Structures are given as structure tokens and as C-alpha cells.
Amino acid sequence: MEKKTIEINITIYQFDELGLEDKKLINNAKDEVHKAYAPYSKFQVGAAIALENGEIVTGNNQENSAYPSGLCAERVAMFYANAKYPNSAPKTLAIAAFTNNEFLLEPITPCGSCRQVLIETEIRFDKKIRILLYGTEYIYLIESVKQLLPLCFEKNSLQG
């Protein structure tokens, strides 16, 4: 038997410690929460993606009374970015969540389905995607989607 350890590295920042580009991206994600359609959960999520071409693409969660038919903010933003700018790699993704009329104290992380979409995009462009997870107390910076999904299912997995 052999044991392996998987570690992830997260850098924790206060908002004031971030660079201007990261602050702008987080503010875009925060703005997006107010556009979310979340009448059932009342849990609004916004996402903003900085692309290599200088564009910022945003998205928010979209719920549906048939629950599986909804879509998370991260996937809304990433699918739009990949459709609108298919040749421009994402550099950084910022995520913010809002409920009970306030932003969350601690950052939220992407769900499993979002992680799978994000890792596919990272692999597709062969470039790391930085992730900024916003909370009012602190912000997590994760340097690569691979950190969130180390044992991922990818196209090489299909070849057996």
C-alpha cells in the first residue's frame, strides 16, 4: 500500500492588499450578484473573468423551479467567455456571494460541476487560471484550477 498526500496552496489577502486589476475584478463579481436570478435559494453569486485580450466577462447564477435546470455564475461567465472570445484564455476568475442582504464573511468555492468546467478551460488553453474568492473578512487567491480539482477527469481520461 502507498499513501499520497494532496495539498492545496491558498494565499489569504485583505481587499486593500490586492492590486488594482484584482480589486476591479472582484468589484465586477460583486456587482453581478445583484443581477442574479435566485428567487428560490436567495443565494446570489456573481463571477467575473479577466481574459488575455483585456476583456472582462461577467455572469451570475440563474435558478429555475426545475432545480437541475439552473446554472452557477462561474459556468455562465466561462461559457460566455469561451463562446464570445474562443481564442482568448482566461487569466483570472473572481467569485462573490450575497445572501440575507449582505456579502458572505468567508469566501465560497465553486461547486464540483463548475470545477470540472474550469479545469477543462485551463487544460484547453494550457494556461493556469487564477481564482479570487471574495469574502468580506478575507479573500482567497488560488493560483490554478488544478489546486481545486487535483484528481480531475480530463480528455486523457477518456483514452483509458
Image (tube, rainbow, N blue to C red):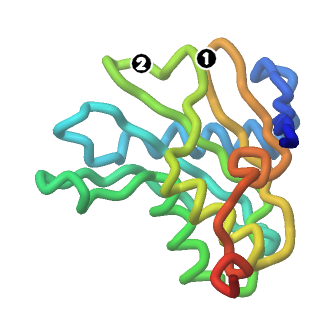
Furthest residue in direction front, as rendered: 1
Callout 1 amino acid: Thr
Q: Is residue 98 left or right of residue 53?
A: left
Q: Is residue 69 left or right of residue 104?
A: left
Helix, strand or loop at mark 2: strand
Residue at image point 34% right, 46% down: 36
Residue 6 percent location from the top left of the image:
82, 39
User: Counting other residues with Cα less than 10 Å from the Cα at mark 2, is it few (<14), some (14-19), or many (20 or more)?
Assistant: few
Residue at image point 71% right, 39% down: 132
| Quadrant position of residue 33 | top left
The image shows residue 104, relative to residue 75, as above or below, that is: above
Residue at image point 65% right, 12% down: 137
The residue under label 2 is: 102
| Quadrant position of residue 127 | bottom right
Which of the labelled discs sits on residue 136, or is there none?
Answer: 1
For marks 1 and 2 on the same chain, the one whose residue lies earlier in the sequence: 2
Could you give the CA–CA distance between mark 1 and mark 2, rounded to whole angstroms? 9 Å
Residue 28 percent location from the top left of the image:
59, 45
Residue at image point 25% right, 42% down: 38
Q: Is residue 89 left or right of residue 115?
A: right
Which of the labelled discs sits on residue 119, or is there none?
Answer: none
User: Counting other residues with Cα less than 10 Å from the Cα at mark 1, is it few (<14), some (14-19), or many (20 or more)?
Assistant: some
Figure quadrant of the N terminus? top right
Callout 2 amino acid: Glu
